[in-house]
Image (tube, rainbow, N blue to C red):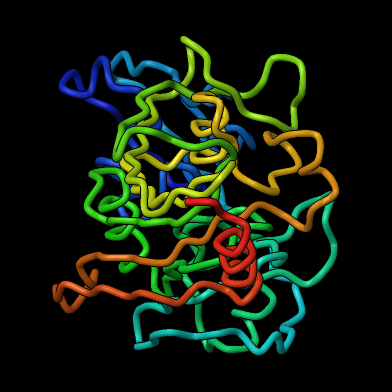
Amino acid sequence: MRKEYVTTKEDKGLRLDQFLLKEIMKDQSRNHVQSRIKSGNILVDDQIVKTGYTIKGQETISILDFEEKQLDLEPVNLDLNIIYEDEDIFVINKPQGMVVHPASSYHEPTLVHGLLYEADKLSSINGIIRPGIVHRIDKDTSGLLIVAKTDQAHRILSDDLKSHDILRYYVAIVHGVIHENHGTIDAPIARHPKNRLKMSVQDQGKHAVTHFTVREKFEHTTLIECQLETGRTHQIRVHMAYINHPILGDPLYGHKEDKKDLGQFLHAYKLSFMHPIKKEQMTFEVDLPDRFKDKLDELRSNSVS
């Protein structure tokens, strides 16, 4: 069984995925629509096309029956640190060492497994592997995350992320003494051309902006606060390494001795956003993990300043 739609002259020039999101699949995410096009589930004049196909007008768009795979992840009680919960969202304080969602190369329990244990429902917009996940932080980064329970909340939060209306603040310990009190790193980020595990600053990369403020200086390191304007993969880690102040303990972008550490000293300590449904401004802040506090105590005791 299929549903069919005929495009008009007014639709000419639109990308296929744009047309579908605008006219037919308004309640779906762009990723979901694109995945259905790529799977051959959406046809133009009975032909499989690419997601960037440009509509010419007077064409028949066919949407075939599509059954989502059932989520086969088992709920796991991970004793998540839930900072806030209502019928629409969670705010979670993720510990260092916890992966946010499963992947083909990672089969241990993740935040998603723990969310499935805690929640009766999670948004479906990001598919069966990432239910509820609006944004991510790295495995070895600790701190605050927003999780959506409903698709409506997820769509609104995703739009707010894109328009920079969700404010995300981090604290980090970096190598070297930063002499400026504050700064902005505006440098595009893309996948590293040689090491696929890494990201790097490249001219053809995606726009990325990180603001930082110095909180405290030590003998060989600096405690900083960062605010993300954009949210690229590994953004703070890449940007700080780019200005020769990599994050302490970062095994991927840091110094050689960092490979022996237990992960980077980077913590998402504060979130401020408009509740997607209640339209109330919400701000959450969490304390530093004990490991982070202990490192600061050590640095202070060794500092000559």
Spot the residue most to the front.
304
Estimate the x, y position of residue 246 in percent, counting from the top left: 59, 36
Estimate the x, y position of residue 2 in percent, counting from the top left: 51, 47
Residue at the location (53% across, 22% down)? 50
Seen in the picture, residue 22 relative to 112 is either above or below; the reply is above
Residue at the location (34% across, 80% down)? 88
In this view of the protein, which residue sits in the foreground, 204 or 120?
Answer: 204
In the displayed structure image, the side of residue 165 where residue 288 appears, left or right: right
Seen in the picture, residue 40 relative to 194 is either above or below; the reply is below
Q: How many marks?
A: 0
In this view of the protein, which residue sits in the foreground, 140 or 204?
Answer: 140
In this view of the protein, which residue sits in the foreground, 230 or 27?
Answer: 230
Residue at the location (51% across, 72% down)? 288
Residue at the location (82% across, 56% down)? 106
Spot the residue most to the top.
203
Seen in the picture, residue 71 relative to 103 is either above or below; the reply is below
In the displayed structure image, the side of residue 196 where residue 291 appears, left or right: left
Estimate the x, y position of residue 64 in percent, counting from the top left: 55, 45
- Dividing the picture into quadrants, the one containing residue 303 is bottom right
In this view of the protein, which residue sits in the foreground, 62 or 154?
Answer: 154
Query: Taking the image as drawn, is residue 262 in sight?
Result: yes
